[in-house]
Image (cartoon, grey):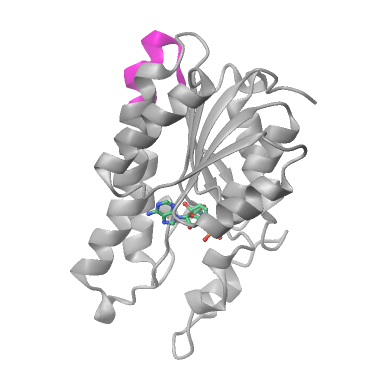
């Protein structure tokens, strides 16, 4: 498939996990990609894995830094000659049992996951073409299903979901689509055993184990690619929950 021939994509979180898999999937389908991450090494690995040299332009930037976001989106638009698709994948996780919840954890989660996503949307939207521009924001199944010890993370992702639905309504008159994609458990560095450290009652998680198990990042990349492609031309303002059936 070459659904992204000639399509210019700005993608955050491209240095690892779902973001890297999405970068490689979109480039393999023809996209020109501007890849952003905090990790220089992660970006280099992603670019090195791309099919053919020079397919991915990389930039180290912190999505939580407003000035950096403004500069990054401007640079992406210049480098690509415009932006057709924005994919916000960058995110962090913190385990926050209520007795250990701190304001600092809450603020950091919201700053990266929610504010970072919102700032990229604000800056990229003027560049997106009327009638074909697309925004895909990675939320989480935690946005709409309870998960013990993840209150702060879930709240930050619930905000990404709510933000995306309202943004879809706001830009629909321009023919721009906004699609929140909510993965369940995905096998990436973000979701290792550290998420549930010893001492916590994990019986809830044993009960909701997804029948398909944890997804591979490439499977979520396939869902994001669909959402961003013309195959999803009638899809906007609707969450795609890709959680392997953990809540059926
Ligand atoms: N892995 C899961 O189970 C899972 C489930 C639901 C949602 N998600 C979401 O998917 C997205 C990708 O997660 P992943 O599992 O691939 O994790 P990951 O840790 O493998 O990748 C996250 C990437 O985001 C980058 N990043 C973090 N903070 C950043 C910042 N301030 N500025 C720029 N880049 C930053 C990291 O450097 C890393 O490359 C996240 O938004 C995460 O919340 C993951």
Name the quadrant containing residue 159.
top left
Q: Is residue 246 above or below residue 191?
A: above
Residue 243 visible to the viewer: no
Q: Could you say where residue 226 lies in the image, as x and y percent from the top left?
A: 65, 30
Give yes or no for residue 169 being in the magenta stretch.
yes
Q: What stretch is highlighted in magenta?
A: 167-177
Main SS of the magenta part reads helix
Q: Residue at x 59, y 60 (%)?
A: 185
Q: In this view, does 37 lie above or below 129?
A: below
Q: Which residue is drawn at 37% across and 9% down?
A: 173
Front-most of residues 163 and 36: 36
Q: Is residue 238 above or below residue 39?
A: above
Q: Residue furthest left?
A: 103
Q: Residue furthest right?
A: 1
Q: In this view, does 111 lie to the left or right of 182?
A: left
Q: Which residue is drawn at 56% across and 59% down?
A: 41
Q: Could you say where residue 238 lies in the image, as x and y percent from the top left?
A: 48, 30
Front-most of residues 241 and 108: 108
């Amino acid at each position: 498939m070459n659904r992204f021939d000639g399509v210019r994509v700005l993608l955050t979180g491209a240095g690892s996990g779902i973001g890297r898999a999405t970068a490689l999937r979109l480039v393999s389908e023809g996209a020109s990609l501007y890849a952003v991450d905090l990790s220089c090494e992660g970006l280099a690995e992603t670019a090195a894995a791309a099919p053919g040299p020079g397919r991915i332009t990389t930039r180290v930037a912190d999505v939580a830094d407003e000035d950096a976001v403004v500069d990054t989106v401007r640079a992406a638009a210049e480098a690509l000659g415009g932006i057709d698709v924005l994919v916000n994948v960058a995110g962090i996780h913190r385990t926050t049992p209520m007795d250990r919840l701190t304001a600092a954890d809450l603020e950091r989660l919201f700053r990266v996951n929610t504010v970072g996503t919102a700032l990229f949307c604000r800056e990229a939207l003027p560049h997106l073409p009327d009638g074909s521009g697309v925004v895909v924001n990675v939320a989480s199944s935690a946005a709409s299903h309870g998960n013990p010890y993840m209150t702060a993370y879930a709240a930050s992702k619930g905000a990404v979901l709510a933000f995306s639905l309202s943004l879809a309504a706001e830009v629909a008159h321009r023919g721009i689509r906004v699609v929140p994609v909510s993965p369940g458990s995905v096998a990436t560095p973000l979701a290792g055993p550290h998420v549930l450290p010893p001492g916590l009652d994990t019986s809830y998680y044993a009960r909701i184990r997804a029948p398909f198990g944890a997804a591979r990042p490439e499977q979520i990349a396939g869902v994001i690619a669909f959402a961003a492609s013309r195959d999803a031309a009638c899809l906007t303002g609707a969450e795609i929950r890709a959680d392997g059936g953990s809540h059926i």
